[in-house]
Image (cartoon, rainbow, N blue to C red):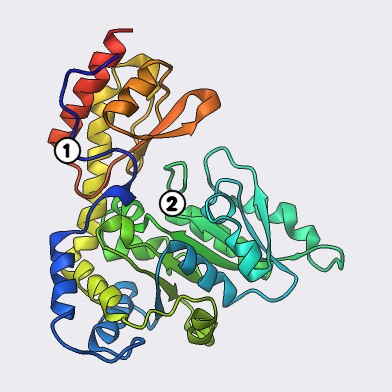
Amino acid sequence: MKISHQPPARLFTSDNAAGVHPDVMAAVVRANESHALAYGLDKYTMQAKDAFSKLFDADVRTEFVFGGTGANILALACVLKPAEAVVCTAWSHIAVDETGAPERILGAKLIDLPSLDGKLRPEDLHSVAHLRGHVHHAQPAVVSITQSTELGTVYSPDEVRAICETAHELEMLVHMDGARLSNAAAVYGATPEALRSFTIDAGVDILSFGGMKAGIMFGEAVVFLKPKLGDRAEYIRKQITQLNSKMRFVSAQYVELFRDGLFFQLGAQANAMALALYERTKHHKSLGLVAPPQVNSLYPTISQPARTALQDWSFFWDWDVAAQQVRWMTAWDTTLEDIEAFGLGVDEVLNSN
């Protein structure tokens, strides 16, 4: 069927589909006005590194990379030794969506454990502890958790703390993949204190810090919350092809993103729009939207031919094809007008079936 309503101006495919916040774009333009030393020796990179230390209220070490996969690889490369393994969930981005980059580039085994909600728990770490000390097994050395998770769930500060305490007791480090960190922080108050509560204060050792899903153009950061772990980061970053010669265009964006709390505001906006989308569409029982989203993603079920009709009209991604489940995701620039326009299309398709 063909939907008669106009589609929304913005897609519900992914927060990666969103543009760049105007203030961030302006910061990139300002950084382009004159020459600057390359490879991070510019004033913007110095300012951005200082901003990260202020954000975490600690002397952290921050290194910039091209993207999220590069951030995860750099973070893990700095702490893994030969014959060591990373413990993660089977849903984790490093296990599912990075084309085997950790295995190929790091030569490290991923011990990917099943999880119904995308989260690891202390008992999961204990379940692999017996591998340590046995010559026939890759040695679990790093725990990697995602905040917020690939299933739209969020670790509480207490949950992260419990994982960190268990990991450290088992002589493992904790890496957090924070691709949607601003959305998770918004759940707990959209403040630096909220961010710190489930990262540095909870015992996380290394953080992949996501900015591209939160309003910047390109470039992510690796934050060594325990700076000593990053002693060789600058050499390893070059070796794994993540050193940007014109780094100022990455770092200038973060300087702006942290100004006046913009990073937290944009995460809160994306979350609020997901909640609005839930409220607008939950009356369609066939969607199976039984609980409000924690962050900026919903996972409704839509059978054919309604699913194809909606995707042809305003595209979004399939999620679990066998279960007829899709993903709707809002972004920092989603508006209530987008929500209403999309809701009208959903109404038209589902009411006609």
Which residue, given by chain and number where applicable, does mark 1 sit on? 9
Q: Position of residue 170 (x, y in %)?
A: 69, 66
Q: Tag 2's secondary structure?
A: loop
Image quadrant in which you'd find residue 73: bottom right
Q: Position of residue 61 (x, y in %)?
A: 41, 82
Quadrant including the N terminus: top left
Task: Tell me which residue sits at (18%, 59%) in the image.
Answer: 21
Which residue, given by chain and number where applicable, does mark 2 sit on? 156
Q: Amino acid at mark 1?
A: Ala
Q: Amino acid at mark 2?
A: Ser
In the rendered structure, find residue 143 and report the number of the disc placed on it.
Answer: none
Task: Tell me which residue sits at (53%, 76%) in the image.
Answer: 240
Image quadrant in which you'd find residue 276: top left
* Alpha-carbon span between mark 1 and mark 2: 34 Å
- As displayed, is residue 113 above or below residue 312? below
Q: Position of residue 188 (x, y in %)?
A: 32, 52
> Which of the two residues, 101 or 275, is positioned nearer the viewer here?
101
Q: Report whether residue 187 is seen.
A: no
Quadrant including the C terminus: top left
Relative side of 103 to 254, left or right: right
Image quadrant in which you'd find residue 194: bottom left
Residue at the extreme top of the image, as rendered: 353
Q: Tag 1's secondary structure?
A: loop
| Badge 1 vs badge 2, beta-carbon distance below 8 Å | no
> Which of the two residues, 16 or 177, is positioned nearer the viewer here?
16
Residue at the extreme right of the image, as rendered: 135
Q: Nearer the viewer, mark 1 or mark 2?
A: 1
Task: Tell me which residue sits at (57%, 58%) in the image.
Answer: 163
